[in-house]
Every structure is written in C-alpha cells, then in structure tokens.
Image (spheres, rainbow, N blue to C red):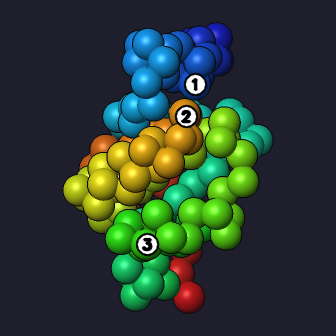
Amino acid sequence: MKKRILMLILIVFMLPLAACGDNVVTRLSVSEAQVMINGLEDVFLLDVRSYSEFRQSRIEGAVHIPYNEIAHRYADILHDIGAVIIVYCQSGRRSAIAGRALADIGFIRIYDMQGGINAWQGSTISD
C-alpha cells in the first residue's frame, strides 16, 4: 500500500515538474494509470477514439471527444486548466496528438496512457 501511494505521489506531482514550466504530456503505463484512477477522486479520463469505438468499448467514467475535435470541443467539458487528465485511444497514436493539443491550449497535468484500451487490464463498458 505504501508503495502504491508513493507511486501515485510521484506520478501526479513530480513528473510534470520535469518540464521546467513547459506544458508537456507525460507518458503513463496502464498500471500507473490504474493507480491514478483508483487513488484520486478527480481524474478526468478522456477517450479520444471515434464515436463508434467509444460506444463499442470504453473505460468506465471516460468522457468522449475525438482526438481531431479537441481544439474545438475541450471547453464543453474541461473547465479546470490544472485538472489531472488521462488521455487514451486504441493504442496510443491519437492520444499523443490529443495530449499535445491540450498542452498547447494550456492544460498542465496531462497523461497519455501508453498502449491505449488495447493494453487496459481493467473492465470496460459498452452501449
């Protein structure tokens, strides 16, 4: 348990400091993402795949904005520039693009879940 808490603290608070003030996207393994999701109340989970992919299978609690619509739709649901945001897609390419777009907008705590939903070990839901 102590190891999990230490890992959570490291992920959430220390890694973004490596950017020296620049807004960066921190790469995150699926296991690190699961620790954050289970350990923090205010993690914003953002699925950036297509609408049909989102309906077919998603991580519970995820909100959907396709990666190519981030710049136009982020304000609809993302109101706190300091929010902890975990971005994921199918395997990692689209989440990297979306994460960079969020960083360019000014968000400062962005995490890109590497491997996407393909690597996710937890349960998923669908419509």
Image position of 23 with respect to 37: above or below: above
Instruction: List the residue tagged with mark 3.
Output: 69
* Side (left or right) of 86 relative to 52: right
Q: Give x and y (percent) for residue 32.
A: 46, 32
Q: Which residue is mark 1?
A: 12
Which of disc 2 and disc 3 is earlier in sequence? 3
Mark closer to the chain start, 1 or 2: 1
Q: Residues within 10 Å of mark 3 (few under 14, many from 20)?
A: few
| Mark 3 / mark 1, whichever is N-terminal | 1
Residues at marks 3 and 1 touching, judged by CB atoms closer than 8 Å: no
Residue 79 placement, left or right of 56: right
Give the percent coordinates (x, y) of residue 23: 45, 31
Residue at the (36%, 46%) spot, across then down: 100
**Residue 85 location (% of width, % of height):** 56, 45
Q: Mark 3 or 1, which is nearer the eye?
A: 3
Q: Is residue 121 visible in the rendered structure shown here? A: no
Kindly indicate whether the residue at mark 2 contacts the one at mark 3 (C-beta within 8 angstroms).
Answer: no
What amino acid does circle 2 point to? Arg
Mark 2 neighbour class, 10 Å CA radius: few under 14, some 14 to 19, many 20 or more: many
Image point 35% across, 34% down: which residue? 27
Q: Is residue 13 left or right of residue 96?
A: right
Which quarter of the figure is the N terminus placed in?
A: top right
Which quarter of the figure has residue 61? bottom right
